[in-house]
Image (spheres, helix red, strand yellow):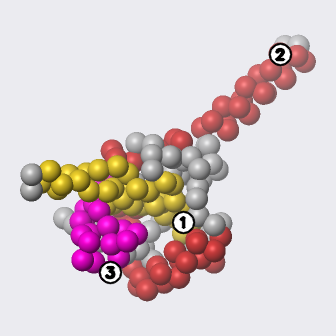
Amino acid sequence: MTTRIRLLVLAALVLLAGVANISGRPDSYGAASLDYRRWTHVKSAVIDPKSPTAGRFGGIHHIYANDKAMEGYRTGQFPDGSVIVFDQLETRENAGTTQEGSRKFIDVMTKDSKRHADTGGWEFEEFTGDNHTDQVLTAQAKAGCFSCHTRQREHDFVFSTFRK
């Protein structure tokens, strides 16, 4: 094999390795996992205008978990590679029926205990609307996420429980 062909093969292998692991994290949210709605549906809730959290969280939210996160729901300890998605939607009323409206945001928790030891092993991400690529949380906002989640230290920093 000529040197040029070897270099082309090497470049192709490097490119394929990068595509196979887009973000460097196993089972990460990113572009490779836009199908989170095919994961296990953990639960849903409706937060109406009377709730003190209605300003930010008012509407319908659905929580989805990948297979590794489902292991964590069963055992109480979420392994690395766990991904939990909080899909927040506006509501629409039509003749007494409440329906899903536009997506407000998607919050994502990804477990990687080596990279995020200072936040219980969790990375916190948020994407607005239907945008699945541009994170909007600042470092300060991520710290705020973790600060709130510390109340759930006994459940590995996760608020939701799996509804059987």
In percent of the image, x 83 and y 15: which residue is there? Answer: 5
* Contact between labelled residues 3 and 2, with CB atoms less than 8 Å apart: no
- Of the image marks 2 and 3, the number of the one nearer the N terminus: 2
Give the amino acid at mark 3.
Pro
In the rendered view, would you say 8 is above or below 34?
above
Give the amino acid at mark 2.
Ile
Give the label, 1 or 3, closer to the camera.
3
Residue 31: give x, y in percent of width and height.
54, 42
Give the amino acid at mark 1.
Phe
The answer for how far apart the CA atoms under marks 2 and 3 are is 64 Å
Identify the residue position indicated by label 1 in the image.
Answer: 124
Q: Nearest the camera: 84 or 143?
A: 143
Answer with left or right where residue 30 lies relative to residue 103. Answer: right
Residue 9: give x, y in percent of width and height.
77, 22
Identify the residue position indicated by label 2 in the image.
Answer: 5
Identify the residue position indicated by label 3 in the image.
Answer: 52
The answer for how far apart the CA atoms under marks 1 and 2 are is 43 Å
Residue 133: give x, y in percent of width and height.
56, 46
| Quarter residue 59 falls in | bottom left
Q: Find the magenta span and give its range.
A: 39-60
Is there any visible trace of residue 114 in the rendered image?
no
Asked if residue 48 lies in the magenta stretch, the reply is yes
- Of the image marks 1 and 2, the number of the one nearer the N terminus: 2
Answer with left or right where residue 45 lies relative to residue 66. Answer: left
In percent of the image, x 59 and y 64: which residue is there? Answer: 137
Classify mark 3: helix, strand or loop: loop
The answer for how far apart the CA atoms under marks 1 and 3 are is 23 Å
Give the label, 2 or 3, closer to the camera.
3
